Image (cartoon, helix red, strand yellow):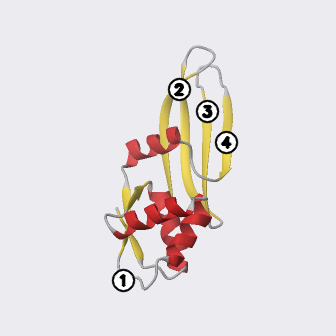
Amino acid sequence: MTGQTAKIASPCECGSMAVRQVNQFILRDELWWDSEFSCGSCGTYLCEHAGPGPAPDDVREALLAAHGSVRLRLVGSVPSFVPALKVFREVTAASMSRARELVGELSHDGLVGTLPEMEFLKARLQMRGVPVDVDR
């Protein structure tokens, strides 16, 4: 399982500083994220979210700050970008124009994101015959 975790200091309702742990991972061929909040002072523990889908910006930013970004690149020639367009439309619910932009990025400098995001896209693109790899 490809996953990443980051811990963020977060204020608790009791006035103490608590810990918010955020995670992003691939589970059952889907990209998931979750967030847990725990306060050592008052004992509060909450699962704020657990489920599939794209992580919100604050979760992504925490993971990128903790682990850095990785790049998904094309590693061979592609006779047609139609399969890649289909993947981006399915995975990101992107418009056709946004999917074209993503394919353009992929075919030039590559796409940048968290390790779980890029590994998830890599698997989906490779299933459609698009030769890609992740630079860590």
| Residue 41 horizontal/vertical position (percent) | 59, 20
Instruction: Tell which circle, 3 or 4, labels the residue nearer the N-terminal end.
Output: 3
Q: Which mark is residue 25?
A: none
Residue shown at 35%/81% (left/top)? 76
For label 2, the residue is: 10
For label 3, the residue is: 37
Q: Nearer the viewer, mark 4 or mark 1?
A: 1
Amino acid tagged 1: Ser
Instruction: Tell which circle, 3 or 1, labels the residue nearer the N-terminal end.
Output: 3
Instruction: Tell which circle, 2 or 1, labels the residue nearer the N-terminal end.
Output: 2
Q: Residue furthest bottom?
A: 79
**Of residues 40 and 126, which is closer to you in this image?**
126
For label 1, the residue is: 77
As measured in the structure, the alpha-carbon distance from the residue carrying label 4 to the one carrying label 1 is: 40 Å
The answer to whether the residue labelled 3 contacts the one labelled 2, judged by CB atoms less than 8 Å apart, is yes
Q: Nearer the viewer, mark 3 or mark 1?
A: 1
For label 4, the residue is: 49
Bin the neighbour count of mark 2 within 10 Å (Cα to Cα): few under 14, some 14-19, many 20 and up: some
Q: Nearer the viewer, mark 3 or mark 4?
A: 4
Amino acid tagged 2: Ser
**In this picture, is 85 found above or below 21?**
below
Left or right relative to 17: residue 71:
left
